[in-house]
Image (cartoon, rainbow, N blue to C red):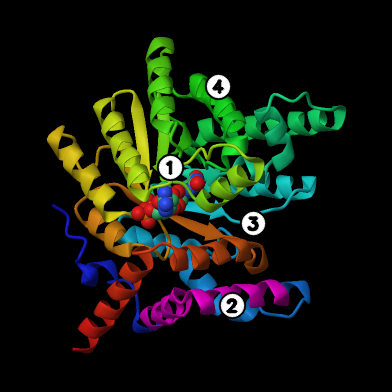
């Protein structure tokens, strides 16, 4: 069994400066009060255009991001690869809704696809639909609302972008992960991706959708598309996650007075996530997976079920993935045992990545257990080095 407590290995490529920065960071954001104060200060500083990007760049950005550009991120990519960990470059400029921004995301995605060509260091490419099209158009599609003329023009432009991305993906032969988003746009995303899977996932699995198992309908959906893939002769690419928008899902359901589409108990999410691993491994000839999780228990279950089924640690169809700067004890110890591991490495201009960094701060404050574990590991490694 992989030893996730081996923190020496987890932090082997971190200098003392890196470790001290991580300690300072996680210690600061572990306090909900300080974390909330700092995130509000950052938001305010951005509004009044106070120059805070420099301080962010040498602290939280340096810990969680690869760099401002793909070339800037090369150092991180190479460092991870020394431990046989692949990089999933994630252009993290979020919440932008102008055509010029969508073109920018398209351009970055194409650059990443091209950089991944015959490059083992970049095993996947990732993007999200809202990087290429307005949220409200996806919402209309989700509700089967008829698009007005303007929307239709924008939707056509989106489909053309998607087409370009898929063509580049076929040339590079690097699988494309598509992130999952809020439930009230996800059906439209699922429908489009299922069509892409039917078109592109035959000999090689090139298109991956993401399933969020905090949603109580996802096991059923998984079984439905699995059946469909067998009947219609295509393969499934799936990124399995718990889901990042739990609070928003609950709040919206309350506001609009409908039953939340997500589990209310963490253990129900855990149960479905672990069940999804089992279903996928039982059907591994039809599915490739990327388990995006920082949960040790789920990572252990993945290993155990692979072993029980006689699957090799480095079976090409199975990947585990974590975010840069988080759960290195899982990533580095898995890759040391020859499992396929990759890290999401966000990159982009500092000011554009700030919403992503604020989410990391909030997540590490609010998730009970997770923060404690990161901080404890860092403290233990500091002690070990000083003893
Ligand atoms: C590589 C990678 C890719 C990702 N891609 C996406 C993506 O495309 N879309 C997306 O939405 N998220 C994505 N995520 C984030 C992911 O969904 C989780 O939010 C995050 O990884 C924390 O979950 P965990 O599995 O690491 O485990 P844990 O830390 O054990 O679980 C925390 C998660 O449990 C769930 N949860 C918490 N409290 C409750 C509760 N009371 N009731 C029910 N469920 C609860 C929430 O989903 C929460 O995020 C990604 C994460 C990684 C590592």
For marks 3 and 1 on the same chain, the one whose residue lies earlier in the sequence: 3
Q: Main secondary structure of the magenta part?
A: helix
Please give the residue where the numbered disc 3 appears in the rendered image. Answer: 93
For marks 3 and 2 on the same chain, the one whose residue lies earlier in the sequence: 2
200 or 298: nearer the viewer: 298
Tell me the residue at 57%/61% (across/down).
356
Q: Nearer the viewer, mark 1 or mark 2?
A: 1
For marks 3 and 4 on the same chain, the one whose residue lies earlier in the sequence: 3
Asked whether the beta carbons under mark 4 and mark 2 sit within 8 Å of each other, the answer is no
- Could you tell me which quadrant the C terminus lies in? bottom left
Q: Nearer the viewer, mark 3 or mark 1?
A: 1
Does mark 2's beta carbon lie closer than 8 Å to ligand 1?
A: no
Please give the residue where the numbered disc 4 appears in the rendered image. Answer: 195
Hey, which residue is sitting farthest bottom in the picture?
386
Please give the residue where the numbered disc 1 appears in the rendered image. Answer: 263
Does mark 4's beta carbon lie closer than 8 Å to ligand 1?
A: no
State which quadrant residue 386 falls in.
Answer: bottom left
Element assignment for label 3: loop
23 or 385: nearer the viewer: 23
Q: Nearer the viewer, mark 3 or mark 2?
A: 2
| Residue 109 showing in the rendered view | yes
Tell me the residue at 65%/46% (across/down).
255
Which stretch appears magenta?
18-45
Tell me the residue at 77%/76% (across/down).
49
């Amino acid at each position: 069994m992989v030893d996730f407590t081996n923190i020496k290995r987890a932090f082997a490529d971190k200098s003392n400066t890196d470790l001290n920065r991580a300690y300072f960071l996680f210690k600061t954001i572990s306090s909900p009060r300080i974390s909330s104060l700092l995130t509000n200060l950052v938001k305010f500083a951005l509004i009044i255009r106070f120059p805070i990007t420099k301080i962010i760049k040498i602290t939280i950005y340096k810990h969680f991001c690869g760099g401002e550009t793909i070339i800037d991120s090369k150092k991180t990519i190479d460092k991870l690869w020394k431990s046989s960990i692949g990089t999933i470059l994630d252009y993290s400029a979020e919440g932008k809704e102008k055509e010029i921004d969508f073109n920018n995301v398209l351009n970055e995605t194409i650059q990443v696809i091209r950089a991944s060509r015959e490059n083992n260091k970049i095993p996947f490419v990732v993007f999200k639909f809202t990087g290429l099209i307005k949220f409200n158009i996806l919402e209309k599609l989700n509700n089967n609302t008829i698009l007005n003329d303007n929307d239709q023009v924008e939707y056509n432009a989106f489909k053309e972008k998607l087409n370009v991305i898929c063509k580049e993906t076929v040339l590079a032969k690097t699988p494309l992960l598509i992130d999952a988003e809020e439930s009230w746009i996800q059906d439209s995303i699922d429908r489009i991706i299922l069509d892409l899977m039917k078109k592109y996932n035959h000999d090689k699995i090139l298109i991956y959708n993401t399933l969020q198992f905090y949603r109580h309908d996802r096991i059923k959906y998984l079984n439905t598309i699995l059946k469909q893939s067998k009947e219609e002769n295509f393969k499934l690419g799936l990124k399995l996650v718990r889901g990042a928008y739990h609070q928003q899902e609950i709040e919206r359901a309350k506001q609009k007075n409908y039953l939340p589409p997500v589990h209310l108990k963490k253990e129900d999410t855990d149960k479905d996530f672990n069940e999804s691993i089992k279903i996928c491994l039982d059907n591994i000839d039809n599915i490739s997976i990327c388990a995006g999780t920082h949960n040790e228990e789920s990572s252990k279950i993945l290993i155990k079920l692979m072993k029980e089924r006689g699957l090799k640690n480095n079976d090409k169809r199975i990947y585990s993935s974590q975010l840069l700067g988080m759960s290195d004890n899982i990533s580095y110890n898995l890759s040391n045992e020859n499992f396929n591991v990759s890290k999401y490495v966000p990159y982009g201009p500092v000011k554009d990545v700030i919403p992503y960094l604020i989410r990391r701060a909030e997540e590490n404050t609010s998730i009970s257990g997770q923060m404690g574990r990161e901080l404890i590991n860092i403290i233990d490694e500091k002690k070990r080095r000083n003893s």
